[in-house]
Amino acid sequence: MKLRLHRLRSACLVMLAIAPSLSPVSASEQAANRAPVKLILDTDMSGDCDDAGALALLHALADRGECELLAVVTNRRDLTNASAAAVDAINTYYGRGEIPIGTDKTGPTAFQRFSPYTTALRDEFDHNMLPDSEAADALDVYRQALRTAADRSVTICSVGAFSNLAELIREEPELIRTKVKSLVVMGGHFPQSNRREANIATHVEAARLVAERWPGEIIWHGFEVGERLVTGARLKSTPQTNPVRRAYELRPMPGNKMSIDAGKPSYDQAAALFAVRGAEPKVWQVIPDGRVDIDDRGITAWTPGSPRAPSATHSYVKIASSPQQLARQIENLMVAPPRQSAQSAGSAE
């Protein structure tokens, strides 16, 4: 009997010793082991620099094999005519200058502006991009990327005005139904608010059309999500050859500071991270079974019940983890060196 108890105790000790190797992998580790998410980024690379931060984050995830950037399309028609060049400068820095880029030619009716950073990225960094007015049309880039993709394989991450998405609904609804797996949107306030959020207010008609007629899944990231996630100050540790750092150096913030001084909210990065890694239960709480309604002023509201489009599903997202911890995770990706730079540094050691 004593011998049997001794063997049982020894077996338990062995199991405890090896338990760490048997513990479940994290959601991000699981994501890294999946096939890369096929993703199109729809961005207003313009006034705010979190668009540059979101693109940096997506390149870092692509370097880890978690996503494949099929295309980047811009919206809001920045008055510098340099949004596409800024995108291409960032893509080139990360070794992906071949990614197709399209621009919105007709889009938003409000909040058009001169960007504080796009001309600097155009003029100070390598790229091979025409002015926005001469670049490929966003709708054509959408068509090409979706037509060549497998069915139900593409995630669209929208972090700007809804003009391109509305045009896609009007012109190519069957492509959306056939090719798009989900649409992750940064826009609005949830569940209720009396404030207008900029991405909605920029082109209210387009935002309402997408909310009412998008024929598939929409996951909404409201203003309140990214507002709690301050990132960007650690870009000071990256090389001056980094165009994302330059964007944060040039984007003013209240108090006579720039975004790189103390960081800024990560509205777009949060949506981009979710678009690739999905609803990690330790990170996000997803509120399903409802719809987003947008009134004619651009005010959003979450309404329990079915979306108006029969094939649609709507949900919105809350942060389930520590905002500080999530911000660190986002910033770690934003400051990660490009894959080719890391490889060069490793070979030089």
Image (spheres, helix red, strand yellow):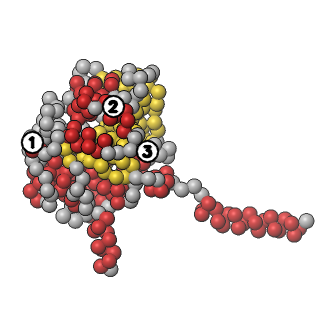
Query: Residue 302, position in %: x, y?
Result: 39, 25
Question: With respect to residue 59, does 255 lie above or below?
Answer: above
Among numbered discs 1 and 2, the one appearing first in the sequence: 1
Residue on which the image places disc 1: 133
Rate crowding at label 1 as few (under 14), some (14 to 19) or many (20 or more) other CA atoms within 10 Å.
some
Secondary structure beneath dot 2 equals helix
Secondary structure beneath dot 3 equals loop
Image depth: mark 3 or mark 1 in front: 1
Q: Residue at x 22, y 61 (%)?
A: 93
Query: Residue 244, position in %: x, y?
Result: 22, 55
Label 3 amino acid?
Gly
Of residues 16 and 56, the one drawn nearer to the viewer in this rendering: 56
Report how far apart the C-alphas of labels 3 and 1 lie in the structure. Answer: 34 Å
Residue on which the image places disc 2: 174
Report how far apart the C-alphas of labels 1 and 2 lie in the structure. Answer: 28 Å
Q: Residue at x 25, y 58 (%)?
A: 96
Residue 224 at least partly seen: no
Residue found farthest to the right: 1
Of residues 101 and 85, the one drawn nearer to the viewer in this rendering: 101
Among numbered discs 3 and 1, the one appearing first in the sequence: 1
Instruction: Answer left or right for 38 relative to 123.
Output: right
Residue on which the image places disc 3: 278
Report how far apart the C-alphas of labels 2 and 3 lie in the structure. Answer: 24 Å
Label 2 amino acid?
Glu
Residue 155 placement: quadrant: top left
Rate crowding at label 3 as few (under 14), some (14 to 19) or many (20 or more) other CA atoms within 10 Å.
some
Label 1 amino acid?
Ser
